[in-house]
């Protein structure tokens, strides 16, 4: 059978399907990003009932059939000892009040330390860590980093430094099933976040990079470095 030369060529079905998939993929990404922005706006006034990290830990416990007891109590920043606030900033984000979400200098230092095998903490700011805790969990991927990169400036804009610090101190993981300053102080030192002392604060801040592996009572060297950094910062 000869093909009719007047018949127009048919568009391959696969090409149309791919275009449709790409279009809906980007629409979905845009909707998820918009939802995350709305959550950040709401977080200016509403304390988050849970986070992506907490949901991830619950799921891991269910998958591995291991016991899991969650401790999570949100308290106002005024009920967190200034020593603990300062220790966390000194340990995790010394330029917290100077940058606008990203500390490029700290990232450069962290990259150099990685190459030398001597990294103590990463280059992520408190704002970056907060966004990761709220939305992305502990996983690492290029897509997650890209989404985080777009949400961090939004968090800085809508929340402000005081609320970012308050949220971070209340949602960060501080041990197995332990989230936030109040729960961490009760779990590790049987005291409240309001009454935690300077030395204990430095030890708690020292475990933040690896809260499931480190223990405050073993952080002698690193806690001394944090205390020295606090003194240098005028705290």
Image: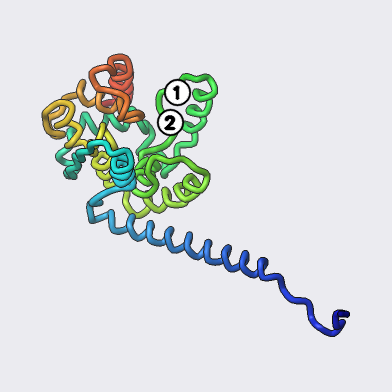
Residue 46, compared with residue 10, is above or below; it is above
Query: Between residues 33 and 165, which one lies in front from this camera angle?
Result: 33
Place of residue 233 in the rendered image (x, y in percent of width and height, measured from the top left)? 32, 26
Residue 56, compared with residue 15, is above or below; it is above
Can you identify the residue that label 2 sits on?
Answer: 122
Element type where label 2 sits in the image:
loop
Place of residue 121 in the rendered image (x, y in percent of width and height, measured from the top left)? 40, 27
Query: Between residues 56 and 80, which one lies in front from this camera angle?
Result: 56
Q: Quadrant of the N terminus?
A: bottom right
Query: Between residues 220 and 144, which one lies in front from this camera angle?
Result: 144
Place of residue 113 in the rendered image (x, y in percent of width and height, measured from the top left)? 49, 23
Residue 30, compared with residue 103, is above or below; it is below
Residue 34, compared with residue 73, is above or below; it is below
* Outermost residue toward the top in this view: 221
Q: Quadrant of the C terminus?
A: top left
Label of residue 60 in the image: none
Q: Are marks 1 and 2 in contact (CB under 8 Å)?
A: yes
Place of residue 92 in the rendered image (x, y in percent of width and height, measured from the top left)? 35, 31
* Residue 161 appearing in the image: no
* Outermost residue toward the front in this view: 1
The image quadrant that residue 230 belongs to is top left
Can you identify the residue that label 1 sits on?
Answer: 119
How crowded is the residue under tag 1: few (<14 C-alpha within 10 Å), some, or many (20+)? Answer: some
**Mark 1 vs mark 2, CA separation in Å:** 7 Å
* Residue 186 appearing in the image: yes
The image quadrant that residue 84 belongs to is top left
How crowded is the residue under tag 2: few (<14 C-alpha within 10 Å), some, or many (20+)? Answer: some
Query: Between residues 91 and 94, which one lies in front from this camera angle?
Result: 91
């Amino acid at each position: 059978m000869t093909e009719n030369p007047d018949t127009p060529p048919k568009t391959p079905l696969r090409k149309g399907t791919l275009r449709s998939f790409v279009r809906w993929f980007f629409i979905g990404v845009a909707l998820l990003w918009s939802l995350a922005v709305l959550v950040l706006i709401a977080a200016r006034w509403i304390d988050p009932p849970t986070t992506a990290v907490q949901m991830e830990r619950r799921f891991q416990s269910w998958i591995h059939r291991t016991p899991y007891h969650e401790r999570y109590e949100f308290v106002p920043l005024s009920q967190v000892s200034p020593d603990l606030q300062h220790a966390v900033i000194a340990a995790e984000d010394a330029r917290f009040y100077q940058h606008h979400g990203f500390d490029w200098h700290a990232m450069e230092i962290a990259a150099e330390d990685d190459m030398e095998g001597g990294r103590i903490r990463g280059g992520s700011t408190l704002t970056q860590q907060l966004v990761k805790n709220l939305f992305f969990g502990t996983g690492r991927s290029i897509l997650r980093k890209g989404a985080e990169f777009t949400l961090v400036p939004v968090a800085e804009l809508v929340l402000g430094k005081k609320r970012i610090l308050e949220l971070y101190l209340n949602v960060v993981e501080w041990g197995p099933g332990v989230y936030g300053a109040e729960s961490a102080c009760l779990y590790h030192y049987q005291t409240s976040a309001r009454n935690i002392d300077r030395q204990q604060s430095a030890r708690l801040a020292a475990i933040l990079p690896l809260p499931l592996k480190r223990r405050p009572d073993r952080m002698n060297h690193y806690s001394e470095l944090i205390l020295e950094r606090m003194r240098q910062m005028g705290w």
